[in-house]
Amino acid sequence: MTFEMMGNAAGAGMLAGMMALFGAFIILFWILALGMYIYTGFAFMTIGKKAKLKNPALAWIPLVGPLIIAYQCSKMHWWPWFLIIGIFIPVIGFIFSIAFAVFSIIWQWKMFEKIKYPGWWAILCLIPFVNLVLYGIAAWSKK
């Protein structure tokens, strides 16, 4: 066995190890994403029940379910949803996405106030993982 053949074998082993590590990260990512989806789905469904919404199960719609619950709690007009369409327009999409983010904070502010919690929690919800704690407190505490 020559030195070059040993180098190729070591390179192949390293590549296999890197692929296994990458695969493990992908699996871990999907497990965490599924866990967060289930957690926020239950939290926003409970918040919707506390707010006496007609259909709190809308919280389970992927990506927009929690925003729908916050929107329904806020009782604001429907037109900000058109901002989602504007996000996909190439030049002005960035401006539309900022506007939609502002409206989602306003909706959450009003949602927290409707279930008798401080509205400024919506601003704290911009901090990753703090938002999960606040949603849990809002959903399952006895206030």
Image: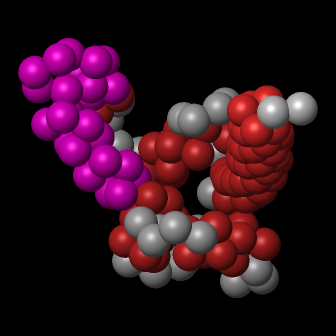
- At 78% from the left edge and 72% from the top edge, which residue is drawn? 140
Examine the rendering and report whether any part of residue 88 can be seen: yes
Image quarter of the N terminus: top right
Residue 139 in the image: state x and y as whole percent.
72, 67
Vertical relation: 68 (above or below) 141 = above
- At 17% from the left edge and 17% from the top edge, which residue is drawn? 90
Q: Quadrant of residue 130?
A: bottom right
Left or right for 133, reference 130: right
Examine the rendering and report whether any part of residue 19 can be seen: no
Looking at the image, which residue sits at the far front? 2
Looking at the image, which residue sits at the far right? 1
Q: Quadrant of residue 60?
A: top right
Relative depth, front residue between 67 and 86: 86
Vertical relation: 69 (above or below) 106 = above
The colour mode here is secondary structure
- At 10% from the left edge and 21% from the top edge, which residue is drawn? 91
Q: Is residue 12 magenta?
A: no
Vertical relation: 69 (above or below) 1 = below
Magenta segment, prevailing SS (helix, strand or loop): helix
Q: Which region of the structure is painted magenta?
A: 83-107
Residue 118 in the image: state x and y as whole percent.
46, 80
Q: Is residue 97 magenta?
A: yes
Left or right for 58, reference 42: left
Left or right for 52, reference 72: right
Residue 86 in the image: state x and y as whole percent.
23, 21
Q: Across the whole image, how many numbered discs are drawn on residues?
A: 0
- At 70% from the left edge and 83% from the top edge, which residue is drawn? 143
